[in-house]
Image: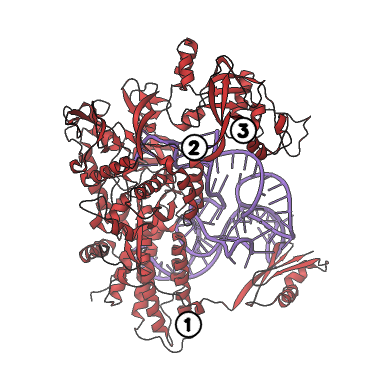
Chain colours: A red, B purple
RNA sequence: GCGGAUGUGGUGGAAUUGGUAGACACGCCGGAUUCAAAAUCCGGUGCUCUUUGAGCUUGUGGGUUCGAGUCCCACCAUCCGUACCA
């Protein structure tokens, strides 16, 4: 054995173990055959933006700790990695750097893979793929066709952001303050025919399925439930007073029909369009409503405006009540029927609208404690529960009962029906972009939309495309579109829309589990590993990605391709790693490493120019507020980088980046190395001595308490607590102890240090394990078990309070009974002095905890 | 706007889920060691004051309780999402 170095030399140790793990195929999961106790650990795969940043390091380190820990617990672990490689940034890079999206993307993947490997994760790299590989997206095209066949895919018109100068569709992110990001032109909303997945068909299932996801964070289930937004209400017909034609209206508050004061329809409602034809003013208003982006945030934040059409409709529940019909910018054609009635007294938005246009405000729900004569609506609508009044046949009912009653009346009289409505909309998957999965259909002038036959897949992207003009390069490619109709053989055109990248990430976990040449995934293998036992990723994916993956799994089950309904058994959501942003005077974003803080100002290192400091937000390539881990790994090593990201914040909480504490992580890793070496030197291997006492017993106990604490922390994914427990452990190890059993207890401590460090600092742990002379690798070693008998304390410290204020503490035997405890507490000199003879009204005694004297 | 979360010393955070607030670290201060430095080791460190003691303290303001960081109500700030960023 070579001379032990005084310092843990990461530069030497870490690459050596990484090479060995690789050579030994240490983390390759078995393919085929029976798998004993399978456990699938998956972190959300990264978008290859260029370089790894600390957000990635945090995410993948945490996943790796779980993968290694589960393996030590005896599971066969699958822990794969791949790349979510299609998407807009590659096209932007192509535009800016005149390189091809594929070149840029694959170069990024190579760079990020080697960065990631330097962290030493226990990943099965043999299963790696990128979603932009034709071998992946071709299989996705096959899945698309299956879903098309199953009736889960259809086309309809939908609104997009339109840049009228560049004549191109914009993503919401490319709309800044209502203007196109490159042209600066005010954005318009425009309708296009688009492909949709029928996610709403599964709305009930997706909502009810949330109840089965017991190991998901409650907040994510709640967010998804609110997003799906199931509500029941009334769809009622409001007849026009002029023509008698009826306008269908959906409402969740039919109980407030007597308080109605107007009807509002969407600007793109068929009636609004019809009326616009001979009303120039209305047409202008509707055109104004079409200005601005399509994002919900933008729509909801714009000032609520309306246009009185002059039409009137009759309230079907209150026949002598006539309501004016407005066109309003806050009514959405996508939700309900695109028409609502307004009850200003009990809806804030309606109230604001009514005040603005001078419409009546009639309260019809009386709050529990209020008087009918004195109750009035000011600037705030009343949306709580109460009793109906001013409401004819509904008077005296609770709001909830009145709602049901109103629906019954509507159904009896034939002017309305009970209806369940979802906030959830069908998933629009069409993208007018190049760098995505081509939708495998053909448009034939005679046969219409025709699916591409399976044997013709994959439909690959052409390489010879240009990005110097805005718009979809597939549209202007000279030949790519041109093809023959698979049905009639005549000339036809390919679909040029590509799929939303969320489709790519909705089934990648299945392909990792069941990599297959011919099919999207091997069904048996997928069934063996799925559902993913532990899925880990950022909280920003709480709704869209997770909901789409859940939908996709159910859709594939409908197609008979999988047996399970939910893709992710346990979910853990991580907080963001955030950093402030810096913007130079010319408007470009600047990386943290390019600037320096000088007093109150932050300046560019190169020029000394002052930069604008923006708020702290999640690290992202687009705003350049990223910290690259390479410098940290080069200076301190992977184990220190890993230890550092695990040590500070609880993983679910956001982490404002700061490298304060990095030195501390380095010192700790060194300390473990040193202390383990000292233990080893003073130790001897062998059977546990029959009798342990004194220092040896104390160390033995200390070791088992550490095992218990670290195990509990890792089970709960409380890595910062595992780190604290390791600190306490090492603080309590004195390698200088002697006497009976000391050598054995020190050996146990050295082994335990290696084992407990294993998931978190695997290189250091593996090196220590080899030093202990073990034949097996640490990654093959079993997790230690704490002996419960060693964890019990025989005395406890009791706090003594007077009127809830701490006055003294006493040590007493564990489980001392109430009477004895009270007696001991009251006899304490400090307590006697503090009481000073005052009358005791009551003494609260909680055994093993506290005594509170009330005077 | 709407939905979800978070808020504790100079800093990151802990608190047996209603029972001693500040574990464990970082930072800082002091000491040992050293020719010196680094590293290491030991001690101190919530704030205030009249300092062997007392008072205050978990974003702000109320409430429930013998007792509240923890439960309830209202508010403030920050972060995430808001369906074409991924």
Q: Nearer the viewer, mark 1 or mark 2?
A: 2
Label 3 – label 1 distance at C-alpha = 82 Å
Whether residue A669 is visible, yes or no, is yes
Q: Is residue A365 above or below residue A265?
A: below
- Which type of secondary structure does the marked residue at label 2 adopt? loop
- Position of A659 compared to A15: left or right? right
In space, the residues marked 1 and 2 are separated at their CA atoms by 63 Å
Point out the tag, 3 or 2, that comes first from the N-terminus. 3
Q: Are marks 3 and 1 on the same chain?
A: yes
Density class for disc 2 (Cα within 10 Å; few <14, some 14-19, many ≥20) is some
To which chain does the residue with label 3 belong? A
Q: What residue is shown at x 28% (from left), y 51% (from top)? A: A82
Q: Quadrant where the C terminus of chain A lies?
A: bottom right
Write down the residue under mark 1.
A697
Instruction: Provide residue A291's location: percent of width, then percent of height.
Output: 43, 21
Residue A423 circle label: 2
Dot 1 crowding, Cα within 10 Å, few <14, some 14–19, many 20+:
some
Which residue corresponds to mark 3?
Answer: A412
**Residue A391, relative to residue B78: is it above or below?**
above
Q: Is residue A703 shown left or right of residue A137? A: right
Subunit of label 2: A
Find numbered disc 1 in the image and state the secondary structure of the residue it sits on.
Answer: helix
Which mark sits nearer the N-terminus, 1 or 2? 2
Q: Mark yes or no: residue A284 visible.
A: no
């Amino acid at each position: 054995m070579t001379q032990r170095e005084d310092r843990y030399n990461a530069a030497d140790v870490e690459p050596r173990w990484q090479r060995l793990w690789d050579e030994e195929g240490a983390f390759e999961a078995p393919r085929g055959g029976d798998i004993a106790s399978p456990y699938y650990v998956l972190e959300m795969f990264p978008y290859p933006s260029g370089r790894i940043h600390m957000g990635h390091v945090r995410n993948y380190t945490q996943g790796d700790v779980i993968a290694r820990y589960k393996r030590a617990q005896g599971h066969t672990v699958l822990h794969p990695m791949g790349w979510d490689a299609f998407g807009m940034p590659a096209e932007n890079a192509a535009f800016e750097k005149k390189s091809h999206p594929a070149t840029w993307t694959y170069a990024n993947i190579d760079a990020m893979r080697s960065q990631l490997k330097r962290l030493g994760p226990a990943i099965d790299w043999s299963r790696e793929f990128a979603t932009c590989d034709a071998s992946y997206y071709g299989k996705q095209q096959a899945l698309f066709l299956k879903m098309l066949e199953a009736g889960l895919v259809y086309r309809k018109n939908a609104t997009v952001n339109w840049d009228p100068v560049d004549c191109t569709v914009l993503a919401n992110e490319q709309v800044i303050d209502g203007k196109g990001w490159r042209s600066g032109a005010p954005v318009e909303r425009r309708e296009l025919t688009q492909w949709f997945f029928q996610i709403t068909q599964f709305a009930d299932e997706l909502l009810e399925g949330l109840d089965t996801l017991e190991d998901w964070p409650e907040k994510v289930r709640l967010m998804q439930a609110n997003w799906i937004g199931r509500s029941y209400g009334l769809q009622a017909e409001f007849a026009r007073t002029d023509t008698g034609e009826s306008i269908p209206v959906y409402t969740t508050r039919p109980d407030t029909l007597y308080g109605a004061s107007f009807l509002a329809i969407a600007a793109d409602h068929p009636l609004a369009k019809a009326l616009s034809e001979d009303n120039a003013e209305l047409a202008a208003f509707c055109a104004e409503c079409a200005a601005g982006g399509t994002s919900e945030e933008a729509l909801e934040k714009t000032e609520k405006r309306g246009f009185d059409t002059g039409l009137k409709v009759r309230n079907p529940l209150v026949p002598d009540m006539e309501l004016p019909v407005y066109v309003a910018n806050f009514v959405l054609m996508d939700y309900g029927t695109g028409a609502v009635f307004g009850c200003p007294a009990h809806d804030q938005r309606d109230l604001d609208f009514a005040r603005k246009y001078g419409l009546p405000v009639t309260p019809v729900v009386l709050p529990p404690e209020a008087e009918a004569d004195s109750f009035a609506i000011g600037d705030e609508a009343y949306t709580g529960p109460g009793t109906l009044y001013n409401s004819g046949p509904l008077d005296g009912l609770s709001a909830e009962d009145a709602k049901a009653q109103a629906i019954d009346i509507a159904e009896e009289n034939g002017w309305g029906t009970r209806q369940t409505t979802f906030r959830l909309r069908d998933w629009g998957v069409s993208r007018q972009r190049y760098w995505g999965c081509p939708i495998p259909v053909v448009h034939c002038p005679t046969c219409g939309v025709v699916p591409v036959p399976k044997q013709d897949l994959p439909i690959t992207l052409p390489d010879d495309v240009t990005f110097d003009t805005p718009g979809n390069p597939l549209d202007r490619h000279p030949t790519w579109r041109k093809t023959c109709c698979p049905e009639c053989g005549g000339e036809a055109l390919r679909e040029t829309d590509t799929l939303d990248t969320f489709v790519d990430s909705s089934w990648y976990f299945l392909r990792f589990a069941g990599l297959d040449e011919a099919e999207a995934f091997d069904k048996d293998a997928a069934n063996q590993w799925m559902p993913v036992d532990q899925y880990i990723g950022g909280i920003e994916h709480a709704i869209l990605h997770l909901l789409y993956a859940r939908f996709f799994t159910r859709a594939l089950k409908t197609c008979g391709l999988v047996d399970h309904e939910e893709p992710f058994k346990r979910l853990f959501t991580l907080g963001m790693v955030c950093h402030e942003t810096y913007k130079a005077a010319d408007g470009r974003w600047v990386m943290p490493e390019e600037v320096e803080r000088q007093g109150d100002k932050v300046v560019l290192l190169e020029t000394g120019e002052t930069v604008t400091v923006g708020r702290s937000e999640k690290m992202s390539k687009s705003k350049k507020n990223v910290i690259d881990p390479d410098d940290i790994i080069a200076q301190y090593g992977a184990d220190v980088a890993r230890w550092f990201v695990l040590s500070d914040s609880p993983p679910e909480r956001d982490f404002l980046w700061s490298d304060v504490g990095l030195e501390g992580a380095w010192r700790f890793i060194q300390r473990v190395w040193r202390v383990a070496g000292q233990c080893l030197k003073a130790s001897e291997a062998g059977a546990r001595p029959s009798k342990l006492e004194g220092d040896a017993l104390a160390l033995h106990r200390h070791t088992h308490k550490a095992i218990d604490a670290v195990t509990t922390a890792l089970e709960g994914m409380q890595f910062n607590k595992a780190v604290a427990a390791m600190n306490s452990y090492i603080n309590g190890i004195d390698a200088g102890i002697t006497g009976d059993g000391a050598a054995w207890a020190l050996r146990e401590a050295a082994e335990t240090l290696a084992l407990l460090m294993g998931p978190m600092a695997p290189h250091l742990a593996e090196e220590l394990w080899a030093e202990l002379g073990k034949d097996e690798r640490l990654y093959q070693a079993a997790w230690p078990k704490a002996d419960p008998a060693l964890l019990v304390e025989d005395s406890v410290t009791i706090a003594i309070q007077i009127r809830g204020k701490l006055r003294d503490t006493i040590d007493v035997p564990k489980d001392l009974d109430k009477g004895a405890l009270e007696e001991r507490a009251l006899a304490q000199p400090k307590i006697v002095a503090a009481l000073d003879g005052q009358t005791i009204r009551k003494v609260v005694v909680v055994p093993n905890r506290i005594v509170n004297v009330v005077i």
